[in-house]
Image (tube, grey):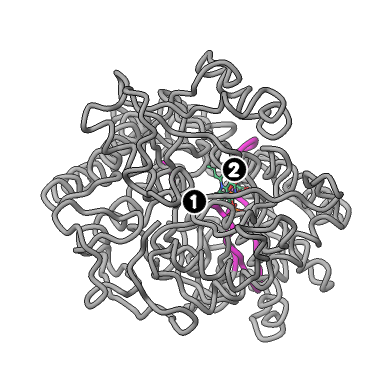
């Protein structure tokens, strides 16, 4: 093992080990674990790499549930749910930007996926007759969301982790992936910084799967974990994979005022109502039929409008009232929400309304992939929140993301297993080179002095994104935001760290994340500026109408020599007619 010694004191980057795999899965959340399990079941040699322990992946925070048309709870007038109804609601919720073939695939697979998880060990909540319980969620025509109290992600993630442990799949935890290794246009593996030791390791693999989650943390007021920095999306972009629909960022209507911890849609699904400072149930004016259970884009805009009109409470929030549900139902179905409200806002929802405001929640855009998770670069695949298939289009329905992770986690693994014989055997030369380059880069960063802190730049970025690319957008304001992002990109070249050690250096990891975040922010900004219409989560004050003539199309961003270019590609239609959306 060679060693790099920095010119500065205390720095010691070492070359770690190189290992060879059929497939490497980057990400230990629901997508990554489900995919690894499937590859392993096919008898292939697979490893999982995660920058945190898999059980700390953001999936663990998912509260409300997973959609599947099981039909265990009848709809209005006793009607029975079907995968076609699920697909229709999803496409309508997406403001007709989702690819209808991908949506149909996901919705058809959903019931079997929920049952399979149950067989693996997920403890779904139950109805009185013993069937899996389902509750109403926004934009859904039927009570369709299966749940484990309000801790669904935790339950499913533990289930899959247990399965991964059972199959003895190696998990490299607290390994931060720093680059994808490209050789002749093919992805042949990745490098990763072992956070505990500072060693840079190489993973040579025939197939590399990105399952790295969303990039919500480029925004302030986010419900996302601090680790949701979009690393995989940025890695893919730098490697030459196009990104799709990055301007579509979901703002969740109900996050806890001040901390922005999520108050799940399950709270409204169980019957919670939204009221303004005059006590009015204002959703009747915005979505007369669906009320609080309109899709998230509609409800978030309504709350933001109420606050802007002075109908919110001082500080900028409205009330989510659960009191009429009674303590029994709150304790049985929403115990986690009650605890969060008590711990972080000092209110007990059994006795008091919860103060809520909209906050960034989900990344609809991501790495452009087909339904098999292929990125277009041989050897590189993506699935889950870091990818854009696209099943969410311009606005995701609650409960569809957990479903996407598990369905496409499995399907992408099937593609990988099918492709492995055709993909190049692990090659060592490019991996050795990539380890050296990564070591040199980290040594250079750790050797800098007298520059700005990465944390200051990150805080500015988050504020710029929320203020200039938030729920309501406008051309001039976005231009100004883009200029500020460019300025931050420039300043980031002069960042230096006070901790110069390579081992256990969290500031170094934050810096490496920030590089990608600044790049993704620019892509979001360019996509939002170019899309001169309002669709789903993307609401422009200066272009308030949906414009199907120009923009019933996916935005595809690519980069060459540091310049980002945008093109548009058609949406896959066919199952449902494009129509006006109303709730
Ligand atoms: C608070 C909250 C509640 C939610 N509730 C619901 C819900 O009830 N229903 C629903 O459908 N959806 C819900 N969602 C959305 C859903 O939880 C996520 O979209 C989904 O869990 C993402 O899973 P994933 O596998 O794609 O990524 P994640 O679970 O985010 O996992 C990403 C993995 O990638 C790893 N990683 C990232 N970068 C690197 C790197 N550089 N090197 C190594 N490893 C890396 C991480 O360590 C992690 O293991 C919720 C979201 C939030 C924010």
- Picture quadrant of residue 155: top right
x 84%, y 72%: residue: 43
Q: Which of 498 and 392 is in front in this view?
A: 392
Q: In terms of sequence position, does the residue under pointer 1 or pointer 2 come before the other? A: 2
Give the crowd class for mark 2: few <14, some 14-19, many >=20 residues within 10 Å.
many
* The residue at label 2 has a CB less than 8 Å from ligand 1: yes
Q: Nearer the viewer, residue 242 or 364?
A: 364
**Residue 489 is covered by the magenta coloring:** no
User: Can residue 516 be seen in this snapshot?
Assistant: no
Circle 2 residue? 58
* The residue at label 1 has a CB less than 8 Å from ligand 1: yes
What is the magenta segment's predominant secondary structure?
strand
Q: Marks 1 and 2: CB-CB under 8 Å? A: yes
User: Which span of residues is magenta-colored?
Assistant: 189-217
User: Is 371 on the left or on the right of 56, as rendered?
Assistant: left
Judged from the image, the secondary structure of the residue bearing numbered disc 2 is: helix
- The percent coordinates of residue 272 (x first, y second) are 53, 34
- Picture quadrant of residue 86: bottom right
Tell me the distance, in whole angstroms, between the alpha carbons under discs 1 and 2: 9 Å
Residue lying furthest top in this view? Answer: 346
**Residue 196 is covered by the magenta coloring:** yes
Judged from the image, the secondary structure of the residue bearing numbered disc 1 is: loop
């Amino acid at each position: 093992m060679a060693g790099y010694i920095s010119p500065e004191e205390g720095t010691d980057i070492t070359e770690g080990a190189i290992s060879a795999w059929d497939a490497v899965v980057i990400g230990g959340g629901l997508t990554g674990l489900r995919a690894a399990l499937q590859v392993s079941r096919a008898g292939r040699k697979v490893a999982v790499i995660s920058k945190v322990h898999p059980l700390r992946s953001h999936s663990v925070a998912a509260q409300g549930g997973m959609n599947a048309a099981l039909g265990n709870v009848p709809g209005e007038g006793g009607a029975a749910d079907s995968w076609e109804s699920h697909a229709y609601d999803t496409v309508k919720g997406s403001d007709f930007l989702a690819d209808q073939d991908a949506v149909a695939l996901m919705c058809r697979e959903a019931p079997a996926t929920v049952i399979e998880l149950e067989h693996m060990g997920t403890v779904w909540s139950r109805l009185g007759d013993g069937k899996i319980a389902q509750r109403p969620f926004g934009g859904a025509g039927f009570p369709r969301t299966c749940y484990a109290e309000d801790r669904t992600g935790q339950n499913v993630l533990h289930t899959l982790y247990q399965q991964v442990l059972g199959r003895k799949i190696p998990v490299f935890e607290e390994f931060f992936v720093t680059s994808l290794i490209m050789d002749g246009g093919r992805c042949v593996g990745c490098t990763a910084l072992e956070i505990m030791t500072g060693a840079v390791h190489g993973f040579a693999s025939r197939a590399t799967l990105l399952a790295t989650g969303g990039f919500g943390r480029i925004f302030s007021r986010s419900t996302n974990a601090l680790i949701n920095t979009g690393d995989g999306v940025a890695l893919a972009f730098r490697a030459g994979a196009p990104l799709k629909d990055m301007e579509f960022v979901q703002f969740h209507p109900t996050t806890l005022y001040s901390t922005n911890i999520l108050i799940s849609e399950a709270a409204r699904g169980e019957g919670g109502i939204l009221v303004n400072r005059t006590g009015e149930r204002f959703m009747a004016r915005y979505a007369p039929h669906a009320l609080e259970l309109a899709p998230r884009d509609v409800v978030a805009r309504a709350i933001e409008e109420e606050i802007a009109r002075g109908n919110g409470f001082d500080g900028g929030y409205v009330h989510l009232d659960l009191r009429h549900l009674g303590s029994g139902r709150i304790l049985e179905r929403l115990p986690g929400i009650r605890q969060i409200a008590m711990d972080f806002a000092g209110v007990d929802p059994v006795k008091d309304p919860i103060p809520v405001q909209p906050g960034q929640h989900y990344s609809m855009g991501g790495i452009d992939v087909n339904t098999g998770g292929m990125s277009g670069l041989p050897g590189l695949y993506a699935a889950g929140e870091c990818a854009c298939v696209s099943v969410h289009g311009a606005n995701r329905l609650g409960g569809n993301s957990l479903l996407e992770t598990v369905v496409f986690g499995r399907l992408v693994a099937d593609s990988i297993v099918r492709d492995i014989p055709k993909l190049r055997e692990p090659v060592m030369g490019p991996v050795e080179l990539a380890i050296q380059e990564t070591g040199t880069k980290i040594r250079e960063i750790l050797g800098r002095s007298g520059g700005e802190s990465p944390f200051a730049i990150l805080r500015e970025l988050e504020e710029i994104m929320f203020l200039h690319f938030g729920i309501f957008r406008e051309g001039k304001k976005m231009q100004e935001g883009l200029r500020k992002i460019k300025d931050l990109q420039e300043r980031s070249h002069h960042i230096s760290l006070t901790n110069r050690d390579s081992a256990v250096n969290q500031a170094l990891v934050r810096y490496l994340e920030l590089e990608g975040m600044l790049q993704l922010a620019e892509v979001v900004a360019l996509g939002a500026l170019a899309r001169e219409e309002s669709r789903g989560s993307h609401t422009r004050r200066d272009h308030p109408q949906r414009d199907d003539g120009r923009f019933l199309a996916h935005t595809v961003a690519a980069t060459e020599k540091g310049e980002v270019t945008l093109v548009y590609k058609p949406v896959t239609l066919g199952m449902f007619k494009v129509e006006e959306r109303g709730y």
